[in-house]
Image: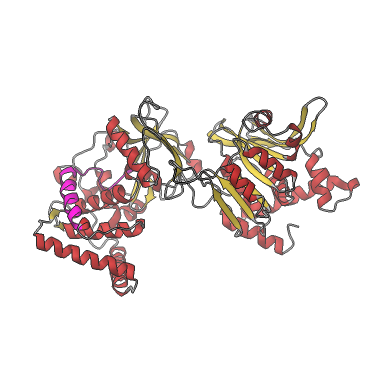
């Protein structure tokens, strides 16, 4: 259900503001945006905004993190694939509104959709059209809709775009569509040919059965096409949220609104909500079936990945979730955040990044620790660009979230069966197998149980290991490692060299942000006093939002491990800090050259190494 936070004005054809007048009042950038054929519905949305009450939203082709300082944001930005988002201010709540602007937003299509679906059943079922490829499903569905709908112009309905405006774009769009049709005709692929043939046969069925086609306007057809693809091929009402790359997390806590965590505007409430238990349960069941893990009252919990790689956790039924079924989606980023982007965000600084560069190149074992949603996986992905480019990496995860730029990367994921048809494959099993694969680096999504002991045995035998870990400090990390159910022997813990501790904190004057609270070195274990010796090398200063290098001229790993590997004599080990500063300068220069993309940074570091500048 869509619950807008304002009373919309009447549609232009029903006495509301004229599309033409509203269009002419827009900025050139916004005119160009809504002028595209797939974005005409966004102009309709703007026409129905009560701007006298809320003010006119500003248009941003792109949004950036500095915009989080806007106190009461009222803006629109593109979300991709003909969708836009309105960030709408709520002055009475800590959360503002997140409004997806969809083609179906103001369309009352319930009866029309029902009629179209009935025709589609005959259209597709009689020919037994089946495919598992989402893109093929989309093509089939759109073609079927074109056969079942009779699109007729409505004299009252027009785009409001002046004739000739962006005609070149429309012409190129028309040309592109013609080329696509021609390429389909010329395509010799048996699969495509089979699809087209099936559609022709299905068209004949319509004529034979004399089924009446549904008469719709162009606006209605675009809305129907969007809804059908969204609900039948995509993830339903969540699809616009999944398309928006600015969203990090999507959460439904039961009945009520869906909330999102936004990279720029933090926690927001959407206009999407569930008001009935049956509606929520039905949606959750459909989601679980789409990801291939049907949920039941017997097995009410699913933890898996969506087709786009996002991680989803579902808890089904009121007996285990008192407010109704709930789900949480952690969005997958196609291009990981790089270490230089984390420096831009203030999560880490150049010297700390250079320190991790030296540690990982030297094969030190590293844990990234912190609370939930503190940025652990993001940090571990980011520092993988510092691993030697010729390394063989083996990653082991419950749900695939790690992203590695190296070509020789073996990605392994656990398997859990819900019946007796197969056997489970645990983290423990995969980690034992990884030790036989001669990896240069083992990456573990998260250590939670007995696999921790195997990980430390791997360290003991010289296999560098990286992992994330749920603990808010080094002390708590050691307590969890040495206690049930992980039970790592205390004299093994000093095989772990570096611990990065992250947290989500309120930064003075900047709002919520993620910061590296400390980078720590594990020095050793005193078996007599049963005490661990560790030191913080970097610390975050909350008063100034800066990082203090407490370990300068006092780092055990830099002076006693890294310096020796780099051939620095024992009586000159302090030279290692000059090397650290040099690498920090290299990273700063790369950043100034605007090379911040994750993969571009990795390639740049390889080029510098080949030129002998980072050895």
Toward the front, the furthest residue is 420
Q: Please state if 503 lies on the left or on the right of 465 as rendered.
A: left
Between 121 and 532, the residue placed more toward the observer is 121
Q: Which scheme is used to colour this image of the protein?
A: secondary structure
Q: Look at the image and give the residue range highlighted in magenta.
A: 100-123
The one of 42 and 530 positioned closer to us in this rendering: 530
Observer-nearest residue: 169 or 277? 277
Residue 118 belongs to the span the image colors magenta: yes
Q: Quadrant of residue 449?
A: top right
Q: Quadrant of residue 492?
A: top right
Q: Is residue 95 visible?
A: yes
Can residue 403 be seen in the rendering of this structure? no
When asked about the image quadrant of residue 184, the answer is bottom left
* Depicted 313 relative to depicted 26: above or below: above
Q: Is residue 594 above or below residue 496?
A: below
- Residue at image position (12%, 54%) is 155
Residue 602's spot in the image, x, y percent?
62, 56
Q: Residue at x 38, y 43 (%)?
A: 241
Give the quadrant of the N terminus: top left
- Residue for point 22% across, 49% down: 19
Q: Determine if the magenta segment contains residue 6.
A: no
The foreground one among 162 and 116 is: 116
Q: Position of residue 118 (x, y in %)?
A: 17, 50
Q: Is residue 300 above or below residue 614?
A: above
Which quadrant: the C terminus?
bottom right
Q: With 425 as the anchor, is 277 left or right in this view?
A: left
Counting every numbered tag in the picture gives 0
| Residue farthest along the left direction in this orientation | 210
477 lies left or right of 573: left
Residue 139 lies, in percent from the top left, at 29, 60
Q: Position of residue 496 (x, y in %)?
A: 72, 39
């Amino acid at each position: 259900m869509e619950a807008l936070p304002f009373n919309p004005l009447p549609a232009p054809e029903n006495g509301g503001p004229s599309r033409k007048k509203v269009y002419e009042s827009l900025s050139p950038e916004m005119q160009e945006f809504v002028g595209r054929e797939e974005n005409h519905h966004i102009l309709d949305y703007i026409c129905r905004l009560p701007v006298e009450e809320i003010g006119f939203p500003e248009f941003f082709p792109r949004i950036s993190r500095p915009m989080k300082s806007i106190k009461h944001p009222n803006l629109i930005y593109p979300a991709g694939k003909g969708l836009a988002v309105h960030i709408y201010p709520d002055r009475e709540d800590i959360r503002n509104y997140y409004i997806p602007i969809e083609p179906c937003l103001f369309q009352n299509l319930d009866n029309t959709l029902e009629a179209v679906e009935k025709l589609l059943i005959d259209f597709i079922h009689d020919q037994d059209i089946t495919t598992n490829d989402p893109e093929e499903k989309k093509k089939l569905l759109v073609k079927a809709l074109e056969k079942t709908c009779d699109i007729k112009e409505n004299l009252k309905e027009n785009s409001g775009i002046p004739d000739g405006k962006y005609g070149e774009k429309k012409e190129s769009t028309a040309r592109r569509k013609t080329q696509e049709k021609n390429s389909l005709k010329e395509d010799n692929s048996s699969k495509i040919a089979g699809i087209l043939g099936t559609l022709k046969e299905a068209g004949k069925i319509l004529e034979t059965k004399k089924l009446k086609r549904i008469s719709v306007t162009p606006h209605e057809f675009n809305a129907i096409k969007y809804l059908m693809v969204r609900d039948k091929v995509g993830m339903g009402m969540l699809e616009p949220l999944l398309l928006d790359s600015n969203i990090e997390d999507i959460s439904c806590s039961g009945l009520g609104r869906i909330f999102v965590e936004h990279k720029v505007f933090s926690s927001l409430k959407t206009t999407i909500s569930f008001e009935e238990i049956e509606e929520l349960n039905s949606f959750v069941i459909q989601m679980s079936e789409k990801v291939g893990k049907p949920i039941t009252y017997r097995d009410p919990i699913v933890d898996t990945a969506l087709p786009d790689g996002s991680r989803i956790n579902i808890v089904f039924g009121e007996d285990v979730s008192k407010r109704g079924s709930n789900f949480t989606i952690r969005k997958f980023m196609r291009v990981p955040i790089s270490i230089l982007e984390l420096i831009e965000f203030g999560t880490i600084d150049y010297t700390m990044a250079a320190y991790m560069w030296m540690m990982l190149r030297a094969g030190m074992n590293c844990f990234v620790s912190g609370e939930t949603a503190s940025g652990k996986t993001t940090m571990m992905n980011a520092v993988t660009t510092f691993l030697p480019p010729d390394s063989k990496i083996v990653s082991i995860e419950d749900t695939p979230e790690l992203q590695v730029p190296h070509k020789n990367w073996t990605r392994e994921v656990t398997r859990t069966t819900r019946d007796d048809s197969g056997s489970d494959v645990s983290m423990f099993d995969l980690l034992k197998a990884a030790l036989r694969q001669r990896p240069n680096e083992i990456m573990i999504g998260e250590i939670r149980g007995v696999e921790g002991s195997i990980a430390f045995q791997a360290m003991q035998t010289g296999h560098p290991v990286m992992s994330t870990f749920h603990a808010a400090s080094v002390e708590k990390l050691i307590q969890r490692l040495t206690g049930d159910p992980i039970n790592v022997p205390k004299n093994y813990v000093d095989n772990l060299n570096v611990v990065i501790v992250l947290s989500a904190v309120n930064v003075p004057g900047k709002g919520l942000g993620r910061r590296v609270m400390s980078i720590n070195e594990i020095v050793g274990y005193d078996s007599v006093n049963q005490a661990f010796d560790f030191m913080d090398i970097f610390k975050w200063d909350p008063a100034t939002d800066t990082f203090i290098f407490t370990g300068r001229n006092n780092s055990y790993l830099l002076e006693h491990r890294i310096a020796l590997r780099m051939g620095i004599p024992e009586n000159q080990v302090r030279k290692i800090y000059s090397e650290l500063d040099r690498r920090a300068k290299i990273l700063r220069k790369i950043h100034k050259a605007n090379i911040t993309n994750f993969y571009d940074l990795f390639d740049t570091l390889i080029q510098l190494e080949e030129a002998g500048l980072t050895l």
